[in-house]
């Protein structure tokens, strides 16, 4: 995959007029080939020759073009493509002189640099020092991404290629930006595909039911949080992104940190973006069914693609030969160095199906009096995933995991925090021989090393609170109770505040 490269120069206009395609705002592929065959370049043959150098530059090792070239005859056309088409270029060759005379070069350059990580080459027949002086103050914070070169085809081409090689070694965004952008776009498309299967009005009505005041801002915020969290999940589990970073020599633990940082930043950009929804389509109060199962299953869980075999915190798994489900409790950092940090022990928390295992659940709690009295009478609602107070009478403060997507349907489960087991995973081998110890300590746990399979994973922002709710029950945070009489005395002190 080549770098995206564009040239912004009014030299393209005259040959475009000559072949009657001047109505187009940019040229690439066959359209650019047509332009380059025209005779009307006059003194701007340097631009034509520069384009030919880029188009004929082939990576002999990969047998692919090094550059994806697109031409614009005016900076305004590039800005329009940037905003309307979401077009991005890793490198921009920006002509300094325009025949119209009303082009504000500084303003256009500032817009481009402020909104992208692109590298800009200003090329000109003017004295370079005069351009350096013109951009020094207004573009001071971006000068590390601006280079001024003489308008000469071969010389400009060689200087640009040398700079690109330097950037590939030293600039993270330049090295990975294009591929990361494509992977992010694919993740967004995957999320949109899932959302396209849901009726918009019914989803909005579900969200309205969560807010008594039905404020548009609150519902819009919920929509953005759902979309942002899903895109973050997709990026963190992207096998293409993992492979890209791994192939460039980045260790597994650093990959995890990078993915978390990148995915969280993208999620925040979505969460704090301008309003998605203006409230113009508020569903009426008809008997429209509320798709709580589908919407909340999508919010609470996600299913990484089959090729992603990494084991992570929050995975819900099952033995390939059985039906029992378990929640993976080990931390992500530990799972990245599983045999070193975890000693080969996978911590699993039991999950019980409340329909098929109802008799088993009753047996767990048969000796608790509250189940037969106050619990049945007073139990009305569960306020959140990790609010276990109301389920404490069941013993061990289990957590209800509703609408878990299992085998094409939604099932409800109880997770029992104290039912933790340790599964010993044998060390992996390579070609029938034990792994070298230096390699073993850096090896993450994958499902290929177990006889378990992933059903789904608990999504952001639920997996963290759920993990800590489990740990809280395991450690039993708290201190001894006050004597009953002292409890009453202290309660009175609080009540007195409001007298």
Image: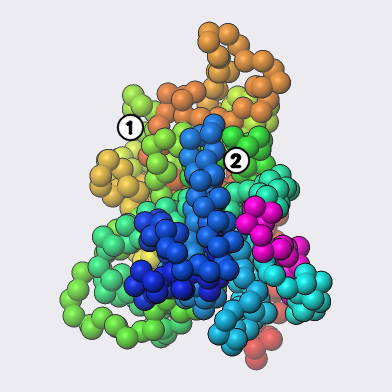
Left or right: 74 in relation to 127: left
Looking at the image, is mark 1 or mark 2 earlier in the sequence? 2
Viewer-proximal residue, 169 or 222? 169
Real-space Cα distance between discs 1 and 2? 36 Å
- Secondary-structure class at tag 2: helix
Viewer-proximal residue, 304 or 13? 13
- Name which residue lies at 70% across and 48% down: 162
Would residue 245 be seen by someone viewing this image from the given angle? yes
**Residue 396 to residue 127: above or below:** above
Q: Is residue 263 magenta?
A: no
**Residue 431 to residue 200: above or below:** above
The residue that label 1 is drawn on is 323
The residue that label 2 is drawn on is 245
Pinpoint residue 442: horizontal percent, then vertical percent: 66, 28
Query: Which segment did they paint magenta?
Result: 139-157
Pinpoint residue 287: horizontal percent, then vertical percent: 18, 76
């Amino acid at each position: 995959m080549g770098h995206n490269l564009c040239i912004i120069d009014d030299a393209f206009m005259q040959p475009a007029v000559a072949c009657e395609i001047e109505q187009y705002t940019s040229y690439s592929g066959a359209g650019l080939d047509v332009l380059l065959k025209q005779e009307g370049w006059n003194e701007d043959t340097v631009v034509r020759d520069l384009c030919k150098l880029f188009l004929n530059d082939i990576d002999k090792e990969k047998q692919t073009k090094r550059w994806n070239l697109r031409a614009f005859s005016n900076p305004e056309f590039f800005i329009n493509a940037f905003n309307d088409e979401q077009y991005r270029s890793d490198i921009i060759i920006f002509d300094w002189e325009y025949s119209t005379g009303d082009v504000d070069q500084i303003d256009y350059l500032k817009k481009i640099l402020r909104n992208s990580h692109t590298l800009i080459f200003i090329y000109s027949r003017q004295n370079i020092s005069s351009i350096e002086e013109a951009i020094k103050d207004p573009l001071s914070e971006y000068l590390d991404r601006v280079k001024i070169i003489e308008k000469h085809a071969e010389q400009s081409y060689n200087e640009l290629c040398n700079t690109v090689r330097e950037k590939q070694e030293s600039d993270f965004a330049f090295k990975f930006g294009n591929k990361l952008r494509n992977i992010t776009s694919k993740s967004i498309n995957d999320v949109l595909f899932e959302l396209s299967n849901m009726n918009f009005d019914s989803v909005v009505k579900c969200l309205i039911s969560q807010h008594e005041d039905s404020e548009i801002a609150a519902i819009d915020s919920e929509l953005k949080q759902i979309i942002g969290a899903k895109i973050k999940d997709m990026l963190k589990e992207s096998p293409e992104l993992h492979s890209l970073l791994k192939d460039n020599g980045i260790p597994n633990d650093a990959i995890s940190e990078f993915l978390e940082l990148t995915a969280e930043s993208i999620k925040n950009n979505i969460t704090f973006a301008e309003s998605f929804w203006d409230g113009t389509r508020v569903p009426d109060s008809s008997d429209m069914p509320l798709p709580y199962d589908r919407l909340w299953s999508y919010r609470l869980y996600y299913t990484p693609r089959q090729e992603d075999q990494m084991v992570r915190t929050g995975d819900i798994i099952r033995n390939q030969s059985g039906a029992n489900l378990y929640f993976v409790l080990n931390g992500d950092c530990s799972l990245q160095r599983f045999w070193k940090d975890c000693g080969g022990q996978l911590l699993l928390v039991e999950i019980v199906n409340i329909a098929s295992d109802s008799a088993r659940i009753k047996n767990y709690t048969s000796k608790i009096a509250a189940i037969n009295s106050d619990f049945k009478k007073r139990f009305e609602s569960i306020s959140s995933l990790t609010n276990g107070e109301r389920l404490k009478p069941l013993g061990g403060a289990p957590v209800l995991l509703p609408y878990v997507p299992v085998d094409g349907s939604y099932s409800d489960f109880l997770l029992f925090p104290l039912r933790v087991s340790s599964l010993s995973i044998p060390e992996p081998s390579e070609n029938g021989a034990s792994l070298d110890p230096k390699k073993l300590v850096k090896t993450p746990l994958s499902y290929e090393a177990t006889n378990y399979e992933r059903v789904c994973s608990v999504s952001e922002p639920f997996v963290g609170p759920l993990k800590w709710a489990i740990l809280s029950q395991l450690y039993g945070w708290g201190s001894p109770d006050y004597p009953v009489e002292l409890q009453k005395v202290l309660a009175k002190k609080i009540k007195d505040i409001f007298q």
